Image (spheres, coloured by chain):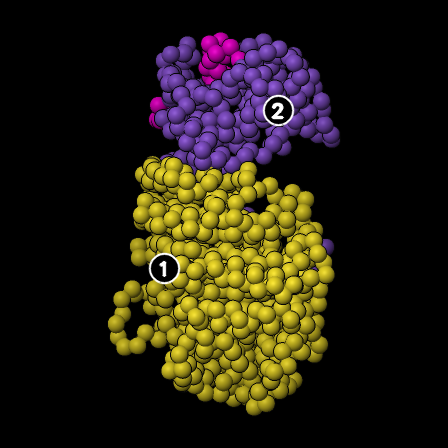
Amino acid sequence: MQRLGRPLLNQASRGFATQSPRYYAASKEVKFTAENYPNAKRDSRFAQLTLDDVNHFKSILSSPSSVLYGQDDTSELQGFNTDWVRKYRGQSQLVLKPKTVEQVSEIMKHCSERNLAVVPQGGNTGLVGGSVPVFDEIVISLSAMNKIRSFDEVSGALVCDAGVILESADSYLRERNHIFPLDLGAKGSCHVGGNVATNAGGLRLLRYGSLHGTVLGIEAVLPDGTILHDLQTLRKNNTGFDLKQVFIGSEGTIGIITGISILCPRRSNAVHTAYFGLQSFDNVKKAFIKAKKDLGEILSAFELMDGLTQDTYHTATGKPYPLAERYPFHILIETSGSNAEHDMAKLEAFLEQVMGEEIVADGTLAQDKTQADELWKWREGLPEACAHWGGTYKYDVSIPLDEFYTLVEDTKKRLEDAGVVGGTTDESKPVVGVVGWGHMGDSNLHLNVPVRRYDKGVEGLLEPWVYEWIQKRKGSISAEHGLGFAKRDYVHYSRDPTSLELMRRVKKTFDPQGIMNP
Amino acid sequence: MASLRILVPVKRAIDYAVRPRVNKAQTAVEVAGVRHSMNPFDEISVEEAVRLREGTPAKTIEDIVAVSIGPAKATETLRTAMAIGCDRGLHVEVPEAAEMLEPLQVAKILKEVVDREKPDLIIMGKQSIDDDFSQTGQILAGLLGWGQAYGASEVKLEGDTVTVRREVDGGTDVVKGKLPLVITSDLRLNIPRFATLPNIMKAKKKKIEKMKLEDFQVRAENRLKTLKVTEPPVRQGGGTVENVDGLISRLKELGAL
């Protein structure tokens, strides 16, 4: 899952802090989801929050700073009610920050008795409105559960609280020469629990695989307050159903993940980063095949960014382009291995071939870590760059590689034909442009439509058209971001009725009252 | 003055973005298995030399040579310099196990290199980020009897006159000097470019001349002795308070109010 990185404020020295997208976007009010989507109705079976409830929660959470309560949408609560893309805004009056799994259990026991709906929230960096309330659901923030519990240097198994920030977990592991098997743009804010709950994919999935493989166990609180203790550190355990798998990617609908154990590989001490410009998508495909062949076991990322994304990043940040010329496609390749000389020899052979056969038109190889980080920003900084103008319609989809980029071209044509695209200069049109980037190595494309304002007309042009397009090609409408509020009505484009029915039954088994993230 | 020759000394150092660690014996910083790259100030110097060439009529600058004094892997550093735009490299190989050379020794070696290569201008980093001596440029200028401009943030070359802007406490200082000259670069002189693939490929075919420490009159004998290397004291973790009242009472407790 690629999500928000830290705000670009650390670039203040370069003099564009005031243009930081976050700052820009913050100047606009976000409409309540309930007003924006009048078809969404609050389930009347859920109870209304009373002062007694609040007092009960206060007695569970001894510390006063763990309970945030307000009748109106105060600024303190607003951060928990509004999602990162500034598209969804709930009206919760209560945020709870439990510190222990027992507190979570007590909270859920009460909610289940009273039939109060809840939304578990991690770092709130999600892109599909899954981590914020729609109406008045109670927000249970895991941010106060942020301890590393244990780490086994021999097996590489890390056990930690759900609220540990991904980057903190990774720094902890770096000290011990290991790496968290997941990396994504939002690492500075997102929680590992949220990553598991949404089955985040990220930048290194190509190398380390999905969380379905790396997560060894979870600890979760079920809707009725029961604690599921399954924090094992075994790689193999074929004893009955593998229940943790149901939680991975469940988006907080069947329980609250409070702790995880995950298998962490050794950190590679030789990492190389290269950035290329290519003339056509055909060449991108050729480069991908070559990379798999020549770089094989050391290839750890293969990211595609189209030309317009790089222009967008350039405009939003004012940074000079890495390459002298501009190209319709750019790719970023990273290798991670144990021996710098061997890796370099492989990489150089690869570079010579792709240059020699004119598969890539130009490129650069980072000469040091600073340059590598800089090149990564041209990929990781894209979500923020797109938000620069106000908002972004985001589609995170899996498409077979043959037609990988066609979706961007088709979408662009559709919106241009409708006359809503204004580029960076025409203020009267809602859409700034249509851009695409993604994890080519995982057939995962991020179609992004940066807009000046969210507009029903534009939304109508895009949805369900994009989903139908995907369905025709047997792709997935949600590769790694999850469904959230944004896509829950569109699941049938990617799943057959039988699967959907089974999912409904699973949900009912775990959460008969339906109070979890309704 | 036609056909200038520029010499750029470059050093292989622990990567700027890597957190250095002290070795177990507390005698030095751990270098084994740690990512190395060109000292950032030297990279800026290479970039500046190449920009000077690009900013002047063709053939004003006839030759840019990068020189590195260091272990076998210093050739990687030279390749980087040549990928940015240096014409050739000169590697003075120092055995991996040898003690790190001190600024005086480095300057003496560089002086002999200068006597041989006869450059008109030397651009080098004002310091290396590993030992932070910030002395080599000055000593070299002294040994050569050349003028020097320390900590350049802007360099202008007109004929045989060089104007250098330096950032000093409380403002900028502009100095002017005639070639030959030693310039040491500061961080804000420029932002080094990304070396393009074709240039990286070309750099592989450029020549690196190898020399050994024994080819020089300098004795590798240190005058300084490192007694002990330690990490800076660990910051004491902060505490959290529940609210403003808690903060105030805690501050009072600590005697801050």
Chain letter for yellow, please. A
Residue type indicated by callout 2: Gly
Per the image, label 1 sits on a secondary structure element best described as loop
In front of the other: label 1 or label 2? 2
Q: Give the residue drawn at x 62%, y 30%.
A: B189
Q: The disc labelled 1 sits on which kind of residue?
A: Gly
Classify B209 as above or below A283: above
The chief SS type of the magenta part is helix
Image x and y of residue A321, in percent: 57, 42
Q: Residues within 10 Å of mark 1 (few under 14, many from 20)?
A: some
Residue A291 visible, this orientation: yes
**What residue sits 65% from the left and 63% below the top?**
A419
Picture quadrant of residue B191: top right
A327, above or below B128, in the image: below
Locate residue A33, reporting x and y percent.
Answer: 63, 75
Q: Is residue A497 left or right of residue B65?
A: left
* Residue at the spot 55% in from the left edge and 28% down from the top edge: B47
Please, which chain is the residue tagged with disc 2 on?
B
The reply to the same-chain question for discs 1 and 2 is: no
Cα separation between marks 1 and 2: 49 Å
Taking A384 as reference, is A113 above or below it? below
- The x, y position of residue A3, in whole percent, is 53, 60
Residue in the foreground of this view, choosing between A98 and A282: A282
Q: Which residue is mark 1?
A: A209
Q: Write down the region rendered in magenta.
A: B95-119
Give me the chain that's purple: B
Query: Which mark is drawn over residue B55?
Result: 2
Quadrant housing the C terminus of chain B: bottom right
Q: Are marks 1 and 2 in contact (CB under 8 Å)?
A: no
Q: Secondary structure at mark 2?
A: loop
